[in-house]
Image: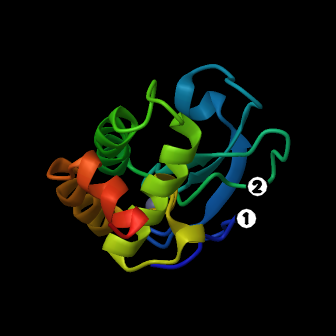
Amino acid sequence: MSAPDLHPTKCNICGSDVVYASNAEVYGREYGNGKCYLCTGCGAYVGTHWPRPREALGILANAQMRKGKMACHELFDAMWRGKNHARSKRTRLYLWLSIQLGIPFEECHFGYFDLPTLRRAYAILRVAEPEKIWKELNGE
Ligand SMILES: [Zn+2]
């Protein structure tokens, strides 16, 4: 795993050509900025940045990866969303997770994870205890 290519031309899953396309091709109508990178082989896709519509938000994802990403986010977000100091907790959680996964902090985004990494992240998050994490990060 490494930092994703933000202008992908080959699919990270199957190696086929990737086209820059309207996201109506995957959603049936245009959403957001209306753009995505779409694999011509397996149909995996990734949305693009607002307001930089040429910049991919991560690596191309298939249905399994999208499901994994949602499952991880559910566990992850429950640990910071709506809590005191939510934004700082969120940042510290990403830091903590990057240490657990052994990856650079800058690359610790669920949209950057391939399927094996999503599975590892899920296994870590499933047993994570937020109170212990805050203590660990404070060096207590
Ligand atoms: Zn593909």
At x 54% / y 52%, what residue is drawn? 91
The kind of residue on which mark 2 rests is Glu
How far apart in space, not on screen, are marks 1 and 2 (Cα)?
6 Å
- Can you identify the residue that label 1 sits on? 7
At label 2, counting other C-alpha atoms closer than 10 Å, the crowd grade (few under 14, some 14-19, many 20 or more) is: some
SS for tag 2?
loop
Mark 1 lies on a secondary structure that is: loop
Residue at image coords 35%, 51%: 65
Q: Which of 39 and 4 is in front in this view?
A: 4
Q: Name the residue under label 2.
A: 55
Q: Which residue is drawn at 54% across and 60% down?
A: 59
Q: Is residue 31 found left or right of 101 in the rendered image?
A: right
Q: Nearer the viewer, residue 115 or 92?
A: 92
Image quarter of the N terminus: bottom left
Q: Where residue 99 appears, x then y in whole percent?
A: 39, 74
Q: Residue at x 27, y 47 (%)?
A: 131
Amino acid type of the residue tagged 1 in the rendering: His
Q: Is residue 28 left or right of residue 77?
A: right
Q: Is residue 102 above or below residue 72?
A: below
Q: Is mark 2 within 8 Å of ligand 1?
A: no
Going by the image, does 128 lie left or right of 76?
Answer: left
Where residue 120 appears, as percent x and y from the top left, is 24, 65
- Quadrant for the C terminus in the image: bottom left
How many numbered dots are placed on residues in this image? 2
